[in-house]
């Protein structure tokens, strides 16, 4: 008898998409109702049958990717939404909606089915107040344990004083005693340490130099960006915020995530010319983000400011120079608008095209330098080949996406698999490596820079030949957008770090009733303990660097 899990059957899959009736039959014993969301149907299920329902949909229908968990409070109930997809085809989507009683917001945890639900459910508990039975570690994740109330609950009193007692910040080893039989030691790494790539605290237990356990402690940079978005209008006030999530030059990618969700919600068609500009700008941002990832990873591995870091910053600056010409800003671009972009290419256009082409033409030589200095270096290979191992099934269980997933051989990229913008009209390839280690993740990013350059070059050719009288940069969008009440949508784009998704629920006003951000860094960071346990401390630092997280997006 084989111990391998049976391959998921194609239940509910037709030539035209998903047959939700067939999927509903799979879970009919737990089904309370069905909802229409713009991206997928929602199956409303009993709160005590979450694991059974999700396990059935995962093993029998192939929904192996729990991309996001959205929690929200209504006047009469609380609700958790599990946004399910398939790695093989992300366009096959299903939402599992779990309502809970207003006076007892408790439902079953999905952690036993999808490990990514661990942190997502902790966040739902922390910010909204929903409790999850059988969750292995249900406690706050973004706010201190002493925090009073749940900030995204309807009855939250934001003026209530918050008191952090000194006992909560005592030395965690104060009450422990050394055991003669134990050689383990507790080590705090961060939050103010350059190798943690921002304000990240790693609670690390080591046995000699080997990591026995590590727990990422996040929330130091939490600003409740979702609440800020819920206080802003669709048309004008939300778009500046996405630049602040992944602030490492990836702003246009972030802006596109919001734009895609809001444009679907309001049924806005973006002009083709604007789509080409968006695609070009997004790939410039991807190159800039990957260059910084490469440079800082070299710092993590070598431990000092090497030529690699300076070279990477040099090429990132070149990308930012082009982005500055395009958007007027170097980091916080605020260039996208619902329905298009804020303005056309800079004049004279010929100079902009020449500058962009010069940057693209120089990239192959720059990448050769990185391979000479980095990937072929024996020390670098010793530090990265075979370390930070993350097998494909574990990566999928944690909802890993982007270069982290593709470095584990998972062939997924939303630009190709769930096309948006102008990507499906261009010639480029999805890069994967099957090494499943720190080295593979570096190779993926370096090769993705080459693919981004190919995309930019094709966009420049298109824009250069575009008829002047057809250069429409924005659709005709009403000044005030008020989507129909109870309209819900979840849309995502391929950010620099992976799947960046936005869930929006409208209530008929010009502001979202619920705005949820699915951060790729948040899910990717969950994989660190899997990659680090049993490794040396130095290898754990390399594994963290290979994830390429940015805390502005983890904490939001």
Image (cartoon, rainbow, N blue to C red):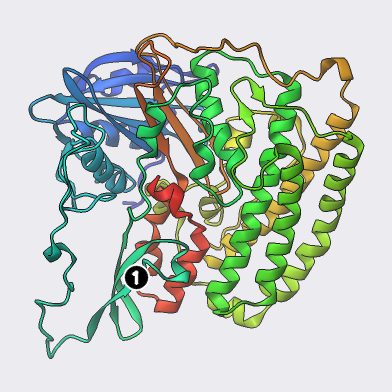
Q: Position of residue 463 (x, y in %)?
A: 84, 30
Q: Residue at x 41, y 30 (%)?
A: 229
Label 1: state its secondary structure. Answer: loop
- Which residue is found at the position 49% from the left and 39% from the top? 500
State which quarter of the image contains the C terminus.
top left
Residue 535 makes an appearance in the image: yes
Q: Pick the residue in front: 267 or 200.
A: 200
Label 1 crowd (10 A; few <14 / some 14-19 / many >=20)? many
Query: Residue lying farthest bottom?
Result: 180
Counting labels gives 1
The image shows residue 295 at horizontal and vertical percentages of 62, 66
* Residue 4 horizontal side relative to residue 76, left or right: right
Query: Which quadrant of the figure has residue 172?
Result: bottom left
The residue lying toward the viewer, choosing from 84 and 103, is: 103
* For residue 399, side relative to residue 548 (left or right): left
Which residue is at 62% across, 40% downward?
333
Residue 445's x, y, as percent? 63, 56
For residue 553, side relative to residue 423 (left or right)? left
Residue 62: tell me if it is visible. Answer: no
Residue under label 1:
533
Q: Is residue 144 above or below residue 353?
A: below
Task: Please give left or right for residue 354 compared with residue 21 in the image.
Answer: right
Can you say whether 451 is above or below 57 in the image?
Answer: below
Q: Measuring 14% from the left and 88% from the top, which residue is drawn there?
A: 181
Q: Is residue 341 above or below residue 146?
A: above
């Amino acid at each position: 008898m084989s111990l391998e899990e049976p391959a998921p059957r194609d239940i509910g899959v037709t030539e035209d998409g998903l047959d939700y009736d067939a999927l509903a039959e799979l879970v009919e014993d737990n089904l309370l109702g069905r909802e229409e969301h713009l991206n997928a149907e929602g199956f409303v299920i009993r709160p005590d049958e979450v694991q059974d329902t999700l396990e059935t949909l995962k093993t029998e229908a192939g929904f192996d990717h729990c991309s996001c968990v959205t929690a929200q409070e209504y006047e009469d109930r609380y609700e958790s939404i599990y946004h399910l997809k398939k790695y093989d085809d992300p366009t096959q989507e299903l939402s599992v909606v779990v309502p809970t009683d207003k006076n007892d917001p408790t439902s079953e945890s999905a952690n036993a089915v999808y490990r990514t639900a661990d942190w997502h459910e902790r966040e739902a508990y922390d910010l909204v107040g929903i409790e999850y039975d059988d969750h292995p570690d249900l406690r706050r994740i973004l706010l201190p344990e002493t925090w009073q109330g749940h900030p995204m609950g309807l009855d939250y009193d934001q003026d209530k004083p918050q008191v952090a007692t000194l006992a909560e910040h005592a030395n965690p080893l104060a009450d422990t005693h050394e055991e003669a039989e134990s050689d383990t030691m507790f080590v705090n790494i961060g939050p103010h340490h350059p190798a943690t790539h921002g304000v990240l605290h790693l609670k690390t237990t080591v046995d000699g130099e080997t990591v026995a356990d590590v727990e990422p402690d996040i929330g130091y940079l939490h600003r409740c960006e979702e609440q800020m978005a819920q206080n802003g209008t669709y048309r004008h006030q939300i778009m500046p915020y996405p630049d602040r999530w992944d602030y490492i030059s990836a702003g246009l990618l972030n802006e596109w995530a919001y734009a895609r969700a809001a444009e679907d919600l309001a049924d806005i068609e973006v002009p083709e010319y604007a789509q080409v500009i968006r695609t070009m700008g997004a790939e410039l941002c991807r190159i800039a983000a990957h260059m910084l990832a490469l440079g800082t990873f070299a710092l993590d591995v070598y431990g000092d400011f090497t030529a690699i870091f300076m070279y990477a910053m040099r090429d990132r600056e070149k990308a930012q120079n082009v982005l500055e010409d395009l958007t007027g800003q170097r980091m916080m671009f605020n260039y996208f608008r619902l329905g298009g972009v804020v303005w056309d290419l800079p004049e004279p256009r010929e100079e902009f095209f020449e500058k962009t082409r010069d940057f693209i033409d120089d990239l192959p030589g720059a990448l050769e330098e990185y391979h000479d200095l980095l990937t072929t270096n024996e020390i670098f290979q010793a530090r990265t080949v075979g370390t930070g191992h993350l097998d494909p099934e574990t990566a999928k269980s944690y909802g890993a996406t982007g270069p982290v997933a593709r470095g584990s051989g998972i062939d997924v990229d939303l630009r190709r698999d769930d096309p948006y913008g102008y990507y499906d009209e261009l010639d480029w390839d999805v890069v994967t490596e099957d090494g499943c280690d720190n080295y593979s993740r570096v190779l993926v990013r370096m090769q993705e820079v080459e693919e981004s350059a190919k995309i930019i070059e094709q966009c420049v050719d298109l824009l250069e030949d575009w008829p002047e009288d057809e250069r429409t940069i924005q659709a005709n969008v009403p000044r005030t957008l008020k989507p129909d009440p109870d309209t819900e949508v979840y849309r995502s784009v391929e950010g620099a770090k992976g799947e960046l998704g936005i869930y929006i629920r409208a209530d008929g006003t010009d502001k979202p009733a619920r705005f949820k951000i699915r951060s790729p860094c948040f899910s990717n960071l969950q994989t660190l303990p899997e990659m680090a346990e049993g490794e040396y401390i130095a290898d754990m630092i390399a594994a963290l660097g290979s994830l390429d997280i940015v805390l502005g997006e983890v904490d939001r």
